[in-house]
């Protein structure tokens, strides 16, 4: 319940910030908005300006502050209906409706340029502001004010008078503008203390529209510049700050952990390293996901938590396939120690993806992250350049958090020369290659560690099979083969140097 107008007001000169009620936006603003200031929230119709304004007021009401919403563009009933669609009640917020319709016998204006005389309707509204002394005010929207003013000079004078009034009251004000009246008019941006822009990103030929929030300016306070994704959901705006603003985490000491397969640990020079990323790359069906899943299962068996972010298959399919290979993930999914996040690349917001990974680490306590695959992630990004930049930030965050990161990347082609749609090898600390090769009338699989920055690794190529009970079985070095990784293997030894491939293992089990 809000205070009455006679209740003593809090000291607003204490330098505290006014939370916006949107955690992600508060992160970008490093705490919130400075009090006794005017801020402009601009964006095209449908970008969520009114929703943001309502969240701002509801947060103030929750903190015991007086709040007022002045609506110029819609009726009070329409505003309350919009709030109800999010499950909100505006009963504790003062709603002031000002119609912009002007009849032939009367003219409504916010301020008169000569004597600053208030019109009859506007005078009653401003009188209510003076009487109620709200801590927070939202005015929706400035396009109506601009039309009432009729001329740019009169509009500027009126705005100066409004700013003087609000400053004298000591409140924090959000001015909403739909940018429809004069899209090239920047004079209000120069007069306010801060500008938050809500933008609708370019539409691809297929998929969801990307919504982007950009803090254009903030006087006297630190903030994080750049584009940050957001979404309009039932319950309000959700802002997904870029992970770069959370990169002040102190990097933990790196330790080596086992993959669960002794031979793979040997190839890696001891195992996986915390704070390092491993890229598993190869053609489709060569066991990339199964190899990564074996590492995840080992982490779960150690008592750690893990999260997998899946683009290319359903979580039910991953569970069933892993169980057939001897890796039962069900107990860990039921206990919550393993979380599977399934994504549709056509609907994915890159900012939402980074937000979910950060939440998996900071909230769920995941110590191992699997992204399967980067091909699906790539299709969700506007272009390859953005993918590289975001992955660079994301891997930096995971490294500083001491997380083991596994990335899966599918290559085009099955035999012969294969290639990747994107080159991410330089971003990762370790690169594991998987390949097909032909021998003794069978299609077989092999793997090799091409590079690692964290240990002295084996430079050998080893055959491996997939199947229960151990899922991943790695054989001896392929001494008698040449050109295996080049896709044109030449065999110069005896067939008995190869691994046995019993029926029901890697030749019959989908991977």
Image (cartoon, rainbow, N blue to C red):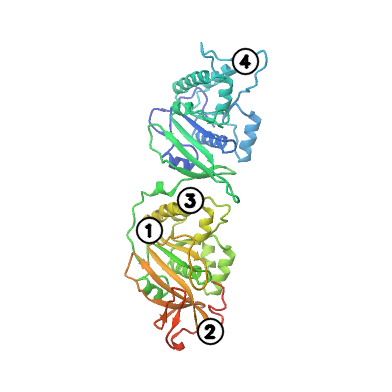
Q: Residues within 10 Å of mark 2 (few under 14, many from 20)?
A: few
Name the foreground residue: 511 vs 419.
419
Residue 452 in the figure: left or right of residue 463? left
Q: Earlier in the sequence, mark 2 or mark 4?
A: 4
Q: Position of residue 250 (x, y in %)?
A: 34, 52
Q: Nearer the viewer, mark 4 or mark 1?
A: 4
Q: Residues within 10 Å of mark 3 (few under 14, many from 20)?
A: many
Decide if residue 309 is in sight here.
no
Q: Which residue is mark 4?
A: 107
In the rendered structure, are the residues bearing label 4 and label 3 in contact, judged by CB atoms less than 8 Å apart? Answer: no
Q: Earlier in the sequence, mark 4 or mark 1?
A: 4
Q: Which residue is mark 2?
A: 441
In the rendered structure, are the residues bearing label 2 and label 3 in contact, judged by CB atoms less than 8 Å apart? Answer: no
Name the foreground residue: 363 vs 282.
282
Secondary structure beneath disc 2?
loop
Q: Residues within 10 Å of mark 4 (few under 14, many from 20)?
A: few
Residue 250 vs 340, above or below: the answer is above
Secondary structure beneath disc 3?
helix
Q: State the separation of the CA atoms marked 2 and 4.
A: 91 Å
Secondary structure beneath disc 1?
loop
Q: Which residue is mark 3?
A: 355
Decide if residue 40 is in sight here.
yes
Q: Nearer the viewer, mark 2 or mark 3?
A: 2
């Amino acid at each position: 319940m809000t205070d009455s107008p006679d209740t003593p007001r809090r000291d607003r000169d204490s330098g505290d910030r006014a939370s916006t009620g949107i955690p992600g936006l508060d992160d970008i603003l490093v705490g919130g908005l400075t009090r006794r200031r005017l801020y402009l929230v601009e964006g095209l119709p449908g970008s969520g300006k009114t929703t943001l304004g309502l969240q701002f007021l509801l947060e103030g009401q929750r903190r015991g502050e007086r709040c007022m919403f002045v609506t110029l563009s819609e009726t009070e009933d329409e505003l309350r209906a919009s709030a109800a669609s999010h499950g909100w009640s505006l009963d504790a917020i003062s709603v002031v409706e000002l119609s912009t319709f002007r009849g032939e016998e009367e003219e409504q204006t916010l301020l008169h340029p000569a004597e600053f005389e208030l019109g009859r309707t506007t005078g009653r509204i401003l009188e209510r502001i003076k009487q109620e002394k709200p801590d927070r005010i939202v005015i929706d929207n400035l396009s109506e004010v601009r039309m009432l003013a009729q001329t740019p000079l009169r509009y500027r004078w009126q705005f100066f008078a409004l700013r003087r009034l609000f400053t004298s009251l000591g409140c924090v004000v959000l001015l909403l503008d739909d940018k429809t009246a004069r899209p090239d008019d920047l004079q209000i941006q120069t007069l306010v203390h801060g500008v938050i822009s809500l933008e609708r990103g370019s539409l691809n030929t297929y998929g969801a529209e990307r919504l982007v929030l950009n803090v254009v300016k903030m006087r006297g306070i630190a903030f994080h510049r750049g584009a940050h994704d957001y979404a309009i959901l039932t319950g309000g705006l959700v802002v997904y700050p870029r992970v770069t603003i959370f990169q002040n985490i102190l990097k933990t000491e790196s330790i080596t952990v086992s993959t669960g397969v002794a031979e793979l640990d040997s190839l890696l020079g001891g195992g996986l390293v915390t704070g390092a990323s491993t890229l598993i790359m190869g053609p489709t069906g060569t066991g990339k996901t199964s190899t990564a899943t074996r590492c995840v299962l080992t982490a779960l068996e150690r008592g750690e938590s893990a999260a997998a972010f899946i683009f290319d298959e359903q979580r039910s399919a991953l569970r069933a396939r892993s169980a057939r290979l001897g890796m039962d993930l069900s107990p860990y999914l039921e206990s919550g120690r393993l979380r599977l996040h399934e994504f549709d690349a056509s609907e994915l917001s890159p900012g939402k993806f980074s937000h979910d990974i950060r939440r998996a680490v900071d909230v769920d306590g995941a110590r191992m992250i699997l992204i399967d695959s980067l091909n699906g992630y790539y299709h969700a990004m506007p272009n390859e350049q953005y993918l590289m930049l975001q992955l660079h930030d994301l891997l930096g965050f995971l490294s500083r958090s001491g997380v083991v990161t596994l990335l899966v990347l599918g290559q085009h082609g099955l035999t012969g020369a294969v290639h990747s749609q994107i080159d991410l090898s330089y971003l990762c600390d370790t690169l594991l290659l998987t390949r097909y090769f032909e021998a003794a009338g069978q299609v077989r699989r092999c793997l090799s560690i091409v590079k690692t920055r964290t240990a002295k690794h084996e430079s050998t190529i080893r055959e491996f099979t997939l199947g229960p009970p151990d899922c991943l079985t790695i054989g001896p070095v392929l001494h008698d083969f040449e050109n295996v990784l080049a896709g044109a293997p030449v065999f110069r030894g005896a067939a008995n140097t190869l691994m046995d491939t019993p029926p029901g293992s890697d030749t019959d089990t989908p991977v």
